Image (cartoon, rainbow, N blue to C red):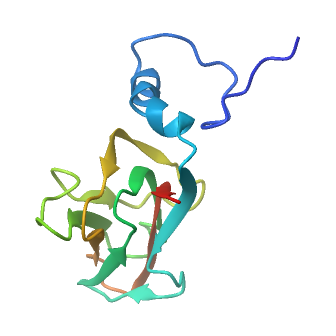
Amino acid sequence: MYPVTDGFTFLRDLRCGLQFLDLVLEQYEDLRRSGGMRNRTWLVPKDSNILIPARDSYEYQVSLVPGSAIWGYCFIADTADPEITPPGTLSFNIRDGCNDQPLFSEVVTRLNAGGPPYPTQLLSKLLILGRPGLLNVEICNTYATAMLGQLALYGGEPV
């Protein structure tokens, strides 16, 4: 008999345990069994060739269908080689467009981490968006040169 692969994470070796992944997947059980959601990825910015200006930020407002759920993210940042480029960071922050509440208690940074692979980070709890379904995303660059950076938000939206 072949092992059953989890269709949400594509993992074969899920076991009952008190580790982060097991606890997170329990939070997503309703979403995983829901037939009224379709997978969706939101890219910020939509064009991956947009440079974040040196020592500046890029602000973007993402419009989602109310009731959409976000379960994870991937921050794709073209961080420089620390031996060539002076130190710096690329970071992002997400706030709810309705009540201005941040998704994270601090900004999320990518510091001289090099290139791929870019890991997908699962949120510890689903983010369900109410009306009007807006997220304010700010991507900041503290490097002395313009850098590439893009945020991918993974989730689902009601159909």
Residue 155 horizontal/vertical position (percent): 48, 54
Is residue 54 rendered to the left or right of residue 15? left
159 or 145: nearer the viewer: 159
Residue sitting at 56 percent across and 12 percent down? 15
Task: Please report the residue visible at 53 percent of the width from the left and 60 percent of the height from the top.
Answer: 159
Q: Position of residue 121 (x, y in %)?
A: 44, 46
Residue 20 rendering spot, x and y as whole percentages? 39, 25
Q: What residue lies at 26% left-to-right and 64% top-to-bottom?
A: 94
- Residue 127 can be seen, yes or no: yes
Kindly tell me whether residue 88 is visible in this rendering.
no
Residue 125 is situated, as x and y percent measured from the top left of the image, at: 32, 38
Say how many tags the image has.
0
Q: From the viewer's perspective, is residue 53 above or below residue 43?
A: below
Above/below status of 132 relative to 24: below
Name the side, left or right, on which 25 lies relative to 61. Answer: right
State which quarter of the image contains the N terminus: top right
Q: Is residue 115 left or right of residue 101?
A: right
Dividing the picture into quadrants, the one containing residue 9 is top right
The foreground one among 98 and 152 is 98
Which residue is drawn at the image coordinates 40% and 52% (left, top)?
69
Q: Nearer the viewer, residue 154 or 159?
A: 159
